[in-house]
Image: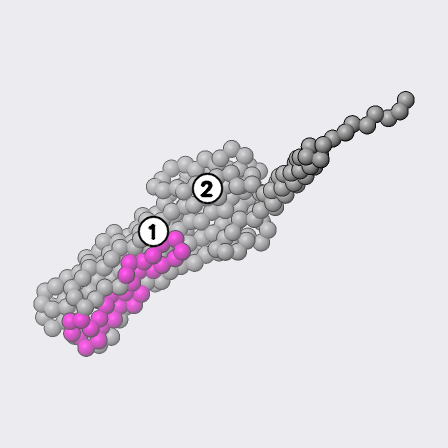
Amino acid sequence: MANKVTRVSPARLSQRIEDDVTSRAVRKLEDRITTLESQSTPLVNGTNTAGTIKGTLLAVRRLSGTGTYTPTAGTTQVVIRMIGGGGAGAGVTSGAGQVGAGGGGNSGWLLELAIAGAPIIGGAYSVGTGGPTTAGATGAAGGDTTISINGVIRTAKGGTGGAFLGAGAGNGIDGGPSAEATQPAVPGTVRQTLGRGGIAWVFGGAVGNGAGGEGGTTELGVGGAAVGRVVTSGLPGQGFGSGGSGGYCAGAASAANGAAGADGTIIIEEYA
């Protein structure tokens, strides 16, 4: 029997070819997306975590206050950014012919962690609060931030407060943050940073010739800006874990508070 030949119009043949090419292109693109997702590596401060975390992103969680962290179902790996509460700036006083300037508070310690488990087991957490507004004294310290992952408690220390300078009439009544809190070693740490509070300064012991120190800054929060020139209380830290700035005062019986630090936070990327 002779072979049957089916005639197809040029327009229909062109459409079939186009549909076939499109279908193959879509399948190829879907396969590529699947491959990229399986090989994806999260970024930590602009660089990857040395290949320790690969997988599909399930969720991004931010924790505040206190409570219990329960991972999303299927989570086997996490990247955590956690920071302690920021320290407050120093509050100052002055008398006749005197000037006072307070140092800025340190930020809390910022930790970036990469942790794998099968599955990830959560636990209790507590986010450190910022050091409160301080009058006439060294700035209050921020609280520690903690979280339990796979049975291990991780801690990011809070920032120390700005140094109290008192009042004087000379030059260079300098001060900065108190000695920084020692950050203990934490399993899974990829990076840790601290934003130091600024130095307070005075020149000539006269109104307008000085400033309090700015608060410590990290990529999660901006410290309070330095204040000066007139009797001014410090400015609070913004964002998460930043330090408050110190106060500045001059003249008879004046006072200026150190500003509060910002509360810390915990940000968790969950991967399968």
Question: Going 55% across and 52% down the picture, which residue do you hit?
Answer: 49
The residue nearer to you, when weighing 86 against 230, is 230
- Residue under pointer 1: 239
Which numbered disc flags the more N-terminal residue, 2 or 1?
Answer: 2
- Please say whether residue 219 is one of the residues in the magenta stretch: yes
**Residue 127 in view of the camera:** yes
- Colour pattern: one colour
Query: Secondary structure beneath disc 1?
Result: strand
Mark 2 is on which residue type?
A: Val
Mark 1 is on which residue type?
A: Gly
- Residue under pointer 2: 60
- Work out which residue is located at the far top of the displayed protein and give it: 1
Question: Going 11% across and 73% down the picture, which residue do you hit?
Answer: 97
- Please say whether residue 248 is one of the residues in the magenta stretch: no
Q: Which residues are magenta?
A: 198-225
The residue nearer to you, when weighing 15 against 116, is 15
Q: Quadrant of the N terminus?
A: top right
Question: Going 19% across and 68% down the picture, which residue do you hit?
Answer: 229
